[in-house]
Image (cartoon, helix red, strand yellow):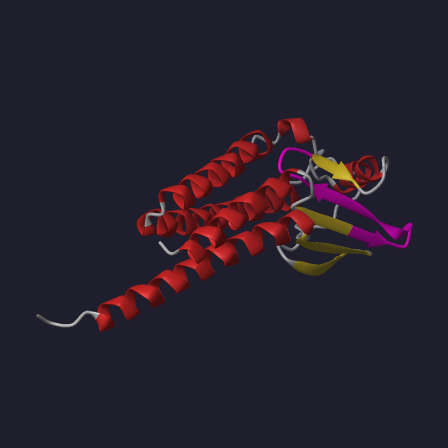
Amino acid sequence: MSIFSRGLLALASLLLVLTYFFPLWRIQLIAPQYPEGLRMFIWVNRITGGTEFDLYNINLLNHYIGMKHIDPNAIPELKVLPFIMAFLIAFGLISALLAKRILLYAWVGTFIALAIIGLADFYKWEYDYGHNLDPSAPIKIPGLAYQPPLIGSKQLLNMTASSFPDIGGYIALVSLLLGIAAVALEIKLSKTAKMEVKPA
């Protein structure tokens, strides 16, 4: 692995440290009764509101329409994700140190696989919260589900729900792109080296 590729991989790995300090994702609800919006931030190990009352108010809305109470302590992914990030950081730094091309490929492949699994799990979580409603809820509209979008905005009754990556999510994306850039560089260098080899 070239020195430049090793530097890209090391930088990509170290960037992931920042995901412990910034939210990965945010969900926002805007409604007439909440014109400034209610925000929920998903971190690597917790869920918080935009203000100290936002998460409480989101759960209050959930109660009226039959959605489950959002309890960060009951979400197992928040206990596992910090270790997954730590694994990617350590794996990336060790791979950069050992300078083995196969380890670079393995790091990027693992990162992509974990990202796909994470997004699929997040979609499943949103689906469960939006479809498995309490039949005794004060507000019931037959056939209506309240699943927020995975990415983008969606109208739910008189509310607009938005779901987008936050700072930590964009940092993770930049980290992955740096790893992919290192892979592309190594493939190019490998092809160039093969072309320069002259037959005996």
Q: Which residues are magenta?
A: 29-46
Q: In the depicted view, which residue is nearer to us: 126 or 190?
A: 190
**162 above or below 20?**
below
**68 above or below 149?**
above
| Secondary structure, magenta segment, majority class | strand
Residue at the limit of the structure toward the left, as seen here: 200
The reply to whether residue 120 is in sight is: no
Relative image position of residue 121 (x, y in whole percent): 53, 44
Residue at the limit of the structure toward the front, as seen here: 200
Q: Name which quarter of the figure residue 150 lies in.
A: bottom right
Relative image position of residue 149 (x, y in whole percent): 65, 55
Q: In the image, 85: left or right of 25?
A: left
The residue positioned 56% from the left and 33% from the top of the image is 82
Q: Name which quarter of the figure residue 53 lies in.
A: top right
Q: In the depicted view, which residue is nearer to us: 63 or 52?
A: 52
The residue positioned 29% from the left and 70% from the top of the image is 192
Q: In the depicted view, which residue is nearer to us: 184 or 69?
A: 184
